[in-house]
Image (spheres, rainbow, N blue to C red):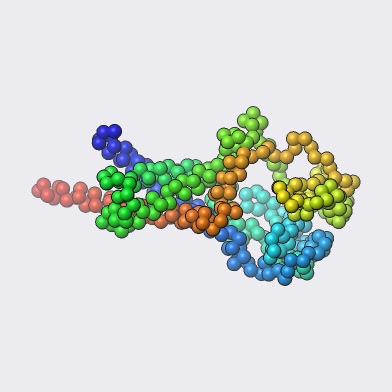
């Protein structure tokens, strides 16, 4: 590659890198910082709402006790729709109620949660989770608080960040002296310049991975088709809007639980979903064995009998790579080292964007000063 071609490419990548950073500054900062916070979602939620997790032990009461306590706490504000049982010691039982009225953020039904102490059945707190800080951060990171098109914007931002990583690595590479010279702190006279180059290099690869996995998550159907999930000729069916729960079920909760346990005798109940309004309301009870994924058992509300599983029923399978992409992106069960890298990967775009803009403004100011000085020197 000739010297002049290298210079032209470097100028091109510099322009691309610059305008990606400057043009997306307002969007990249909230996206990155919200992602950093969500790495520690559970810790953050426990810190902000310690009263919800103030359980007194691990012993459990019959599920109808929790259901009655939750509905009493909900009163006329919500109708009980779901119970989620603790999966780890120190976790509360979580009851979810469907609230009447218009939908909330993103067109989803408004829900009211109750956190219940497992040994006593005491309601620790009730709150509308969608309005909590952590859930607002989830929506900010997932769709920039823009319903509908926001998720696609986040996906294209992921592509832009990947381009920024690729062009940044090209610009970081030393023009003279080789790779090891680029690892030095003093690449230039400005400390801001040195910070931008050093941080950009060390975070480049993890940030590129987070950007691409964010793209896969934002465009799940396209990712499925490209990576071996749903067939391109059979698009994934859209879920219908969630119907409200029945005002009164024909089959009591304890009978529905007995039927589900008889169908899977060696599994424990993980969650219970109340029958919803519709043609054939049914209880949906999630159970999990000693190993393997959880399974859902449907119990017909009218008869109290377990429904036979439909062949080919349920959503189309997602590709394993897409499932891994989500785990890599949010750090689920991948340990504190990768979670720390994700945290830094969320903070780094803010630092790099700000330092990059300051460097650009300083360079622009110097060029303007030189342009003004030339006519004066010619006089």
Is 21 in front, or is 246?
Answer: 21
Q: Is residue 111 left or right of residue 299?
A: left
288 over 127 or under it: above or below: above
- As drawn, the residue found furthest toward the top would be 233
Question: Residue at 71% of width from left, 69% of height from top?
Answer: 55
Q: Is residue 350 left or right of residue 82?
A: left
Q: Quarter of the image holding residue 335?
A: bottom right
Question: Residue at 53% of width from left, 44% of height from top?
Answer: 213
Q: Quarter of the image holding residue 97?
A: bottom right
Question: Is residue 361 something that shows in the picture?
Answer: no
Question: Is residue 261 something that shows in the picture?
Answer: yes
Q: Quarter of the image holding residue 167?
A: top left
Q: Position of residue 38 (x, y in %)?
A: 56, 57
Question: Residue at 61% of width from left, 60% of height from top?
Answer: 42
Q: Is residue 22 left or right of residue 341?
A: left
226 over 117 or under it: above or below: above
Q: Position of residue 290 (x, y in %)?
A: 74, 52
Q: Position of residue 293 (x, y in %)?
A: 71, 47
Is 71 in front, or is 199?
Answer: 199
Is 248 in front, or is 252?
Answer: 252
Q: Quadrant of the N terminus?
A: top left
Question: Residue at 64% of width from left, 39% of height from top?
Answer: 318
Q: Position of residue 150 (x, y in %)?
A: 55, 46
């Amino acid at each position: 590659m000739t010297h002049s071609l290298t210079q032209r490419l470097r100028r091109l990548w510099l322009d691309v890198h610059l305008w990606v950073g400057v043009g997306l500054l307002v969007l990249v900062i909230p996206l990155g910082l919200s992602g950093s916070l969500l790495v520690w979602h559970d810790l953050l939620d426990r810190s902000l709402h310690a009263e919800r997790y103030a359980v007194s032990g691990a012993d459990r009461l019959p599920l109808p006790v929790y259901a009655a306590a939750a509905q009493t706490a909900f009163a006329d504000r919500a109708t009980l729709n779901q119970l989620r049982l603790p999966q780890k010691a120190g976790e509360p039982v979580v009851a979810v109620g469907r609230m009447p009225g218009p939908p909330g953020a993103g067109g989803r039904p408004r829900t009211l949660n109750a956190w219940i102490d497992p040994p006593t059945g005491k309601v620790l707190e009730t709150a509308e989770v969608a309005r909590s800080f952590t859930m607002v951060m989830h929506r900010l990171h997932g769709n920039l608080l823009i319903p509908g098109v926001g998720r696609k914007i986040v996906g294209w931002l992921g592509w832009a960040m990947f381009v920024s990583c690729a062009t940044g690595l090209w610009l970081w590479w030393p023009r003279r002296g080789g790779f090891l010279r680029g690892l030095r702190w003093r690449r230039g006279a400005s400390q801001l310049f040195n910070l931008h180059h050093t941080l950009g290099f060390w975070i480049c690869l993890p940030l590129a991975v987070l950007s691409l996995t964010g793209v896969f998550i934002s465009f799940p159907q396209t990712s499925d088709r490209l990576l071996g999930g749903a067939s391109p000729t059979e698009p994934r069916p859209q879920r219908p809007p969630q119907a409200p729960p029945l005002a009164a079920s024909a089959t009591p909760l304890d009978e529905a639980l007995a039927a589900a346990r008889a169908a899977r005798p060696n599994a424990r109940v993980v969650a219970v979903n109340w029958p919803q309004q519709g043609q054939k309301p049914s209880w949906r009870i999630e159970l999990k064995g000693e190993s393997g994924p959880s399974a859902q058992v449907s119990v017909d509300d009218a008869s109290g009998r377990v429904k036979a599983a439909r062949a080919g029923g349920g959503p189309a399978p997602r590709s394993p790579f897409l499932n891994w992409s989500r785990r890599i992106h949010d750090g689920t069960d991948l340990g504190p080292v990768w979670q720390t890298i994700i945290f830094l990967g969320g903070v780094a775009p803010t630092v790099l964007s700000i330092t990059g803009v300051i460097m650009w403004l300083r360079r622009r100011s110097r060029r303007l000063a030189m342009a003004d000085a030339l006519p004066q020197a010619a006089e």
